Amino acid sequence: MKTSLTQEQIIRFCERVEGAQRRANDIAKLTNEYPEMTIEDGYAVQNALRARFIEQGEKLIGWKAGLTSKAKMVQMGVDKPSIGFLTDAMSRPENTAISTHDMVHPRVECEVAFVTKADLSGPACTRADVLAATDFVMPAVEVIDSRYENFKFDLPSVIADNSSSARFVAGGRPRYVDDIEVDGIGVAMELNGEIVEMGSSAAVMGHPADAVAMVVNILHDMGETLPAGSFVMSGGITAAVAVKPGDNVIARYQDLGSVSLRFE
Ligand code: OOG
Ligand code: MG
């Protein structure tokens, strides 16, 4: 990928985003200072951030696709998907209290996650390639947290901020892709006992495996592949819902059980 940023600018933006993530304070979107920023520039900053986190001892466990459903694109005012990396430090077990104090303005969203059993690489990775390389799918709730003021951004800025990745909880019932309709999984998100969002996994690019293929093809553009054993979230099916201390969230999935979270 070609970038228009100098190495110095990449490091400076990376440090700014990292600081906002670590301190849970909001910052102006990077394009305010650098309007020429491109999607490739965003990935350059995200890659620098990944290198830093790994240097600090975090382990890369997989990737996520973002902005892959119409509901998410409309909510965020962005018309193209993005990807972000996931590390072990972002994972939380089910039913433990998740702190909101180390995030700026967290939101939750229901996703279908894929766990792979074979290496995948682009270019031209397809839905069929992804399904053949999938060990199982499982439900996951992503807790996203944009570090940008008022949760407002454009595509280059959000990509630099690792596509708002913050925490995630995987749970429920893992299933083989041959045993269910991966593109027909109904979901309902409950916040404190009330249904606040409903949807179907078909909302994710027509089929969530297409979102995973997109991740693999973007990784190819960055000179990378997706190794076997990766955990990949395919993107929010519905709009994301804001959470605060004391909130309880249950995401119920057709065929995949449910995932519960609580916040403090
Ligand atoms: C960007 C991240 C999007 C998803 O599943 O669509 C994302 C954002 O909405 O802040 O994770
Ligand atoms: Mg997401």
Image (cartoon, grey):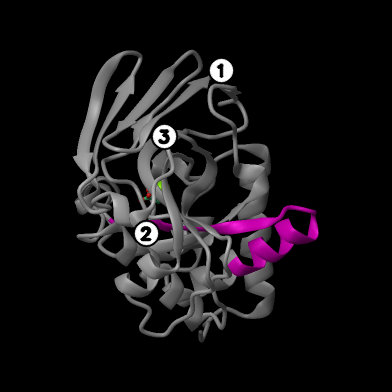
Asked whether residue 49 is in view, the answer is yes
- Is 71 situated left or right of 103 in this image? left
Q: Residue 27: where, in percent of width, then height?
A: 54, 46
| Residue appearing at x 44%, y 17% in the figure | 247
Q: Amino acid at mark 2?
A: Asp
Q: Does the CB distance between marks 1 and 2 fall below 8 Å?
A: no
Q: Does the CB distance between marks 3 and 1 fall below 8 Å?
A: no
| Residue appearing at x 43%, y 68% in the figure | 215
Q: CA distance from mark 3 to mark 2?
A: 18 Å
Q: Amino acid at mark 1?
A: Glu
Q: Amino acid at mark 3?
A: Arg
Reply above or below: 1 against 178: below
Q: Residue 3: where, in percent of width, then height?
A: 53, 82
Residue 54 is a magenta residue: yes
The magenta segment is 47-68
Residue bearing mark 3: 107
Residue behind label 3 places its C-beta within 8 angstroms of ligand 1: yes
Q: Secondary structure at mark 2?
A: loop
Q: Secondary structure at mark 1?
A: loop
For residue 264, which numbered disc appears in the image?
1
Reply above or below: 240 against 231: above
- Is 129 situated left or right of 167 in this image? left
Q: Quadrant of the C terminus?
A: top right
Label 2, residues with CA under 10 Å away: few <14, some 14-19, many ≥20: some
For residue 154, which numbered disc appears in the image?
2
Mark 3 or 2: in front is: 3
Badge 3 or badge 1: first in the primary sequence: 3
